[in-house]
Amino acid sequence: MLQYHQRLPGDPLPHVTQRTAGKERFNLGAAAGRYIVICLLGPSANPALPGVLLAAARRDVFNDSLASLFLVSTDPEPTSLPQERRGFRVFLDHDLKVSRALGAAPFNSEAATPYRPLWIIADPMLRIIETLPAGVHDTQAVLDRIERLPPPERATGIALQAPVLYLPRVFEPELCAELIDRYEAAGGEISGFMREVDGKTVGLHDPNFKSRRDHIVTDPGLIEHIQGRIVRRVVPEIQRAHAFHPTRMERYIVSCYRADEGGHFAAHRDNTTPGTAHRRFAVSINLNDAFEGGEVSFPEFGPQGFRAPPGGAVVFSCSLLHRVSAVTSGARYAFLPFLYDDAAAALRQKNLHTVTSDTEAAQ
């Protein structure tokens, strides 16, 4: 008996990764912050395709601000589909990874048939609002549904507060100044990011995705001083708010986002590879205030950005999608560790073999 995943209203979208027509790897979990509309048509010979493409041309709807449209094609090499653009992407799903995960193809069969064409509409938190059949006459119903929805920042009916801790006075002004001085004396190295490639955690660089420079703190006395401040001023607040007690700290880096280098970091999560799965909480401590932009925001919970005062921290779960907006003036200096516990340390040790030698350059 063929079995299909049943994706119902209120269920979270699976964070499936697949190739698109414009990108080798696109993770659906990184698309939060706007309404997500997924059309699972199967083969491009589906007679509903012309209507879907007409809908895709609605740039007032599908623009990555109000909504994004993902067309799922199971053709081995689709040739009749339009070029991707902002607000419209095509999953090349010939291996059925997306189709199975979302319930259009049976998960207990190698075959694509019988394929169940579907529309799935999800909110900015990537929770399903509605599923509809994807037939020739259903496209307009989907457009009507999207146009009736409130703005993404009011998708839940209220303005949401991201579940973060905002903690002033974690570092003293003298410590902030010392860390900046050490960065300036040593200079910063280009910082990358981590991705899973063929089961390995590898370090990559792409200035369009991330532009930042880092300096690694190695002085034992300074590290001990920093640890003391985190233990006294951050750990108790995590324990109180999240019933979690960090016992370990990863990386001691001073980072710099510079306006003249387009400093920014696109939306990402900090624990999505085997080599980073142990990370539990991220701590973003601003060291200065002579900059514009550079705010940390959480697209799943709305557009609000967070900018702590010098010495202040924004603390959040590594599972939350977050981004750093472009620094438009000056340079933002920050201290950016991760916290975890002994159980997560065991996971880190278990996954150590998946980390490639060049990953240390990617923070």
Image (tube, rainbow, N blue to C red):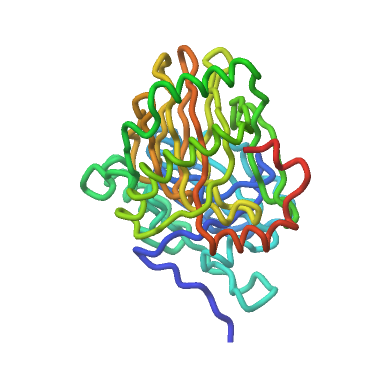
Left or right: residue 318 versus residue 122 is: right
Q: Nearer the viewer, residue 161 or 188?
A: 188
Tell me which residue sits at (40%, 54%) in the image.
Answer: 122
Residue that sits furthest to the front in the current view: 221
Measured as percent of width and height from the top left, residue 152 is found at 32, 42
Q: Quadrant of residue 63?
A: top left
Tell me which residue sits at (55%, 60%) in the image.
Answer: 344
Using the rendered image of the protein, determine whether residue 271 is visible from the camera's viewpoint: yes
Q: Name the quarter where the N terminus is drawn.
A: bottom right
Q: Nearer the viewer, residue 134 or 149?
A: 149
Measured as percent of width and height from the top left, residue 252 is found at 57, 36
Task: Check the image and report above or below for 138 versus 175.
Answer: below
Q: Nearer the viewer, residue 47 or 215?
A: 215
Task: Check the image and report above or below for 64 versus 97.
Answer: above
Q: Quadrant of residue 127?
A: bottom left
Tell me which residue sits at (40%, 42%) in the image.
Answer: 315
Measured as percent of width and height from the top left, residue 341 is found at 50, 58
Tell me which residue sits at (34%, 63%) in the image.
Answer: 10
Residue that sits furthest to the right in the current view: 357
Q: Name the quarter where the C terminus is drawn.
A: top right
Measured as percent of width and height from the top left, residue 103 is found at 52, 68
Q: How many marks?
A: 0
